[in-house]
Image (cartoon, rainbow, N blue to C red):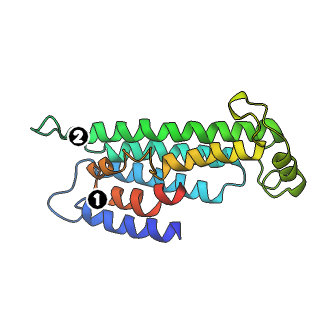
Amino acid sequence: MVTIVVLMIFIYSIGYMGYGTDHVDPNYSRFFAYISLFAAGMLGLVISENLLTLFISWEIMGLCSYLLIGFWFEKNYPDPNKITPRQAGLKAFLVTKIGDLFLLLGILYLYNQAGTLSYADTLFNHEFLHHLATTSSALPLFGGWSVASVIGLLMFGGAVGKSAQFPLHVWLPDAMEGPTPVSALIHAATMVSAG
């Protein structure tokens, strides 16, 4: 499904960026480099076999979303209260990093408990999952909670940031400052779905 959506957005992007017309965007190549890397990050996220490659792909998507939202970074508006693409990209980057931190902490805590990040050894191992569910967390903030609950809550925090849920939703409306194909990719296909 990811490849079909990405293909449709790429096809639309060719015309949107002016290929075959008298006015081709001077940053045509840069746009397709960023959006291709974004698509590679999304595909890496989908096909990852462990949480390390998932997190690396997740971060590639985050970096590319920042670059794509701020694609027209030189644009300024006469109204000083209107957010510029540069500001919108930075806002998206910083707010999603909060969610990324939660995801990273969840992955690190899982690694601390399991010694591996492989899906087969952690998420599909019933004995290990039972151990996580019945062991109390040693973290003082989560006293009395099971390890599984803490890991789940931290990873959920990562998804909240990437999918722009409350309270980490403030970056999503400003993401419209990027090119239209970027908004389509971020809103409909990837960032929200990945989260």
Task: State the mark number for residue 27.
Answer: none
Q: Dot 1 surroundings within 10 Å: few (below 14), some, or many (20 or more)?
A: some
Task: State the mark number for residue 180.
Answer: 1
Point 14% across, 34% down: residue = 80
Q: Where's residue 174, x and y in %?
A: 30, 47
Q: Where's residue 90, x and y in %?
A: 36, 36
Residue annotated with mark 2: 83
Q: Dot 2 surroundings within 10 Å: few (below 14), some, or many (20 or more)?
A: some
SS type, badge 2: loop
Q: Residue furthest left?
A: 78
> Who is closer to the viewer here, 169 or 36?
169
Point 85% across, 56% down: residue = 125
Q: Which comes before the other along the chain, label 1 or label 2? A: 2
Q: Residue furthest right?
A: 127
Q: Label 1 vs label 2: CA separation? A: 17 Å
Point 15% across, 57% down: residue = 23
Q: How many marks?
A: 2
Point 22% across, 61% down: residue = 18
Q: Residue furthest top?
A: 140
Is residue 181 found left or right of 132 in the rendered image? left
Q: Where's residue 121, x and y in %?
A: 84, 51
Q: Give the image quarter of residue 167.
A: top left
SS type, badge 1: helix
Is residue 123 found left or right of 68 in the rendered image? right
* Nearest-to-viewer mark from 1 and 2: 2
The amino acid marked with disc number 2 is Ile
The amino acid marked with disc number 1 is Thr
Q: Is residue 160 above or below residue 14?
A: above
Q: Where's residue 152, x and y in %?
A: 68, 48
Q: Is residue 173 above or below residue 76?
A: below
Is residue 24 found left or right of 136 in the rendered image? left
